[in-house]
Amino acid sequence: MERLKGVVIPMITPLTEDDAIDVESLQRLTDHCINGGMTSLYPCGTTGEMMYLSVEERKLAAETVVRHAAGRIPVFIHIGAWNQRDTIELARHAAQIGADGIGVVTPSFYQISDAGIIEYYRSIANSVPEDFPVYLYGIKQNAVNDLTKHVCEEVAKTCPNVIGAKYSFPDMTRLQELMTVQNGSFDVLVGPDHLFEAVCAVGGRGVVSGNAMVILEHYKALWEAIQSKDFDLATRIQRRTNVLNAVMCAVNNIAAYKVILKNEGVIRTSKVRRPLENLTPGQEKELLKQLEELDYRQVLI
């Protein structure tokens, strides 16, 4: 069973000028991340504008990444949707197209009890083969519902394919609680980038980072330093990425990623799906200017 670790990329979803999925740009982005030394791809997540894409668009994006990656690195598809029916449809589709696993955000917008979340996750896990990996996903600041140790423990207890979680709220106590699920065998990956080194130092498996998609070299170096337990170097690189990430996330991080990737020729447009907001021309200019002033391609060694 494939497992997530290291630097996992929650890919943006490139769009054409007429607001369709830009398949060619998505293929180039796949190569960009693989050639940059990233460890796994994770399309159709929060950074991929998941809730603003149709089920068919999400299937197209998933198929494009799985086929173009062609087994070079693992591809896990985020399949959490607005309702259980669509989520199960996307989960089964991911298994059918040969993805390596899936991630599933908690039910969103409406408040659901822990019992309801447990039943939801069991339904998703049981809809795919029992050897098909499933990662739970908590981002309470967006989804309303939180991911607790109790929920993870109860789901993993009855669903052997539920093997870990991505937790995207900056709570080190909760992250360490999740690491104790299933007697410590439960994988935990962090969403907030500034906690990457710290979480790995206490047993976490890695980070799911949209920023890494843009500054690949820094995250590759940071992961290598963490693996070699050179925490003096890791700390210096972590602090460097924190500065760069603050610039990229100052206004609208998804739009900023697209502006930078377009500027570098990876994708063709910087359009985001409405009602998300594109950066203004002035904001684009200021973003690129600040990154150049920080010599953002220069990696600490």
Image (tube, rainbow, N blue to C red):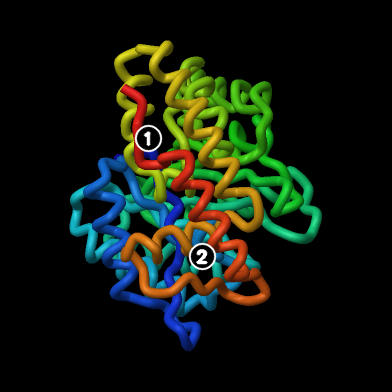
| Residue sitting nearer the eye, 28 or 264 | 264
Q: In the drawing, does residue 142 fall left or right of residue 157?
A: right
State the image quarter where residue 57 is shown.
bottom left
Q: Quadrant of the N terminus?
A: top left
Q: Quadrant of the C terminus?
A: top left
| Residue sitting nearer the eye, 187 or 24 | 24
- The residue carrying pointer 2 sits among few (fewer than 14), some (14 to 19) or many (20 or more) residues within 10 Å by Cα, namely many
Residue pictured at 43% horizontal, 28% vertical: 205
Residue pictured at 43% horizontal, 52% vertical: 102
Does 228 appear above or below 11?
above
Mark 1 lies on a secondary structure that is helix
Marks 2 and 1, how far apart at CA? 36 Å
| Residue sitting nearer the eye, 263 or 136 | 263
Amino acid type, callout 2: Ile
Does 257 appear above or below 2?
below
Residue pictured at 42% horizontal, 70% vertical: 14
Does 136 appear above or below 25?
above
Q: Which mark is residue 88?
A: 2
Q: In the drawing, does residue 78 fall left or right of residue 224?
A: right
State the image quarter where residue 39 is shown.
top left
Q: Which residue in the structure is indicated by mark 1? A: 218
Q: Earlier in the sequence, mark 2 or mark 1?
A: 2
Q: Looking at the image, is mark 2 or mark 1 nearer the viewer?
A: 1
User: Can residue 158 be seen here?
Assistant: no
Residue pictured at 66% horizontal, 55% vertical: 251
Task: Give coordinates of residue 273: x percent, y percent.
Answer: 57, 74
Residue contact between numbered discs 2 and 1, judged by CB atoms under 8 Å: no
